[in-house]
Image: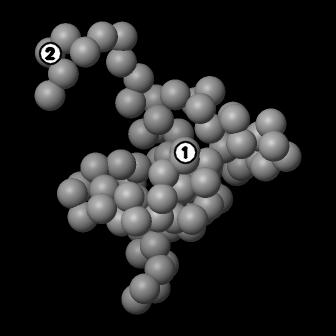
């Protein structure tokens, strides 16, 4: 899954691996890297899925790079058998 986020690096963006693990990305930044809209990320937060996130203020959330990378590693599957 980490290869997916490197696609943005080919266009001149930084790959997630190039960030400090404690850097925080806003939903629009993360969405651009994983090709999901901020709306999708919001829906995931409401369902309790997706990467861990934190509240940065009353109307702002952020995603720590270390948690994004852990989540991406956890998304890898070798088959669809026994998937929930």
Q: Compared with residue 70, is residue 49 higher up or lower down, i.e. above or below? A: below
**Which residue lies most toward the right here?**
12
Answer with the quarter of the image where residue 3 lies. top right
First along the sequence among labels 2 and 1: 1
**In this rendering, does residue 15 appear at all?**
no
- According to the picture, the residue beneath numbered tag 2 turns out to be 82
Give the secondary structure at mark 2.
loop
12 with respect to 27 (left or right): right
* Residue in the image at 21% along x and 57% along y: 47
* Residue in the image at 30% along x and 10% along y: 79
Quote the CA–CA distance across marks 2 and 1: 25 Å
Quarter of the C terminus within the rendering: top left
Q: Position of residue 32 (x, y in %)?
A: 61, 54
48 with respect to 65 (left or right): left
Q: Compared with residue 23, is residue 80 higher up or lower down, i.e. above or below? A: above
| Along the line of sight, the residue nearer the viewer: 69 or 7 | 7
Q: Position of residue 7 (x, y in %)?
A: 69, 35
| Along the line of sight, the residue nearer the viewer: 5 or 36 | 36
Q: Compared with residue 71, is residue 56 higher up or lower down, i.e. above or below? A: below
Give the secondary structure at mark 1.
helix
* Disc assigned to residue 76: none
**In this rendering, does residue 52 appear at all?**
yes
| Along the line of sight, the residue nearer the viewer: 20 or 61 | 61
| CB contact under 8 Å: marks 2 and 1 | no
- According to the picture, the residue beneath numbered tag 1 turns out to be 34
């Amino acid at each position: 899954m980490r290869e997916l986020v490197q696609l943005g690096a080919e266009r001149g963006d930084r790959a997630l691996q190039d960030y400090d693990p404690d850097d925080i990305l806003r939903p629009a930044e993360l969405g651009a890297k994983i090709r999901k809209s901020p709306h999708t990320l919001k829906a995931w937060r409401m369902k309790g899925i997706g990467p861990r996130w934190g509240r940065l203020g009353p109307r702002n959330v952020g995603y720590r790079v270390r948690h994004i990378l852990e989540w991406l590693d956890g998304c890898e599957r070798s088959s669809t058998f026994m998937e929930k």
